[in-house]
Every structure is written in structure tokens, then in C-alpha cells.
Image (tube, helix red, strand yellow):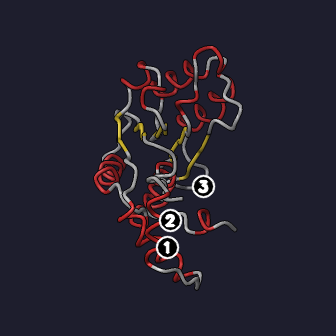
Amino acid sequence: MDWAEKYRPVRLADIVGNNSALLQVAGWARGWTRHSKPLLIYGKPGIGKTSCACALANDMGWETIELNASDQRTAAVIERVAGGGSTTASLTGAARKLVILDEADNLQGTADRGGARAILEIIKSARQPMILIANDLYGISPEIRLRCEPVQFKALPARTISPHLKYICAAEKVECTDAAVRQIAESAEGDVR
């Protein structure tokens, strides 16, 4: 198993950096009602956006339904997977189902065969919490952006990544000098993976 997956955060408290964004996400979840806007978590790759959504669901005891750009993103698929999940109760007994649409900025006009329109309809009719995740806020259509609460995740500074790297080295019993850890953290350019 690769270390990025092995050390993926399980709870919000495990996520490195972006503390104010994490507080915003947790507050949204605690106060969620059927009238709440979906969250739109955005920022560069590798800084914890998807991990945050999954950790939030875990913390809240919510089931997750996840759809991402590697899946077929036609209107029919989005409506069946995300739409059905957003309007029905959990089969596992969870209080809620969190619908996660990852790589939402990859829905481009007619190329997605109606996917952006389907997302708009799901947002309007959702009875379950929903999080859209994007690298580029402006890669999302304005109609969708206006119906979401934005949460920005920022690239992590090397000084935030270094202690996490040291923790992983210790857990894996790998010896690494402070200078090497610092160099790895700096070359990561804000990506914690």
C-alpha cells in the first residue's frame, strides 16, 4: 500500500493544515438542514479536499456516495448515482448520506452530455448534504457556484508538511535527516501527498 493511502486522514482532526477551512466544513455539517447550500471545496490538488469530505462523513457517522471525473459523467449517471442518493434515506442506518462530487470542475458544457445541468437539478432537490470538490473554482459554472457555499483550501507551507513527514518516517521506521525532510517538504509545493 502506498503511504499516501496508508496515512490518509480518517477524521477531520487528522488533516494537516487548512484549519479555518476545516472549522467551516465542520460547522456546516453540524448545522446542516435541507435548506443548507452544498459546500464547494476548492484548491490545488493534494491539499486534503477529498480527504476532508470523507473524514467529515466519518466524523458525522454519515454514509458516503462518491462520484468523480473518472466515472462516466453523463446526466443519466449523475442523476442515478448522486441524484438518487441525495433524495433517499440511508440503507445502512446512518443519519445522513453525504453526496461527494469530486473533480466537479471537469464538467464542461455539452462535453459532459448534460452533467452540469443534472448537478443543478440535484442541488435544487437534494435532501441530503452535498459537497462538490474542484481544483479551479472558476472551472465550475456560475450557476452551480452561486448555489454553493465556497470553502477554499490553500497549499500547505513546507513548515506544515515537515512534521507530518517526520511522523510518517517514524511510523515506517525510516531514518531521514531534518535537512532531507525539509527538502522534500519544500519540493512538494504545498501537496501533502
Q: Using the numbered discs, state the Cα–Cα distance from disc 1 to disc 2 in whole angstroms.
A: 6 Å
Furthest residue to the top?
110
For image coordinates 56% across by 37% down, the residue present is: 103
Mark sitting on residue 184: 2
Can the viewer see residue 99 in this picture?
A: yes
Q: Secondary structure at mark 3?
A: loop
Please give the label number shown on residue 180: 1
Compared to 149, does 2 lie above or below? below
Sequence-first disc among 3 and 1: 3
Q: Residue at x 55, y 18 (%)?
A: 117
Q: Residues within 10 Å of mark 1 (few under 14, many from 20)?
A: few
Q: Amino acid at mark 3?
A: Thr
SS assignment at label 1 = helix
Q: Percent from the top left, x then y, of residue 16?
A: 40, 62
Neighbours of disc 2 within 10 Å: few (<14), some (14-19), many (20+): some
Q: Which residue is mark 3?
A: 92
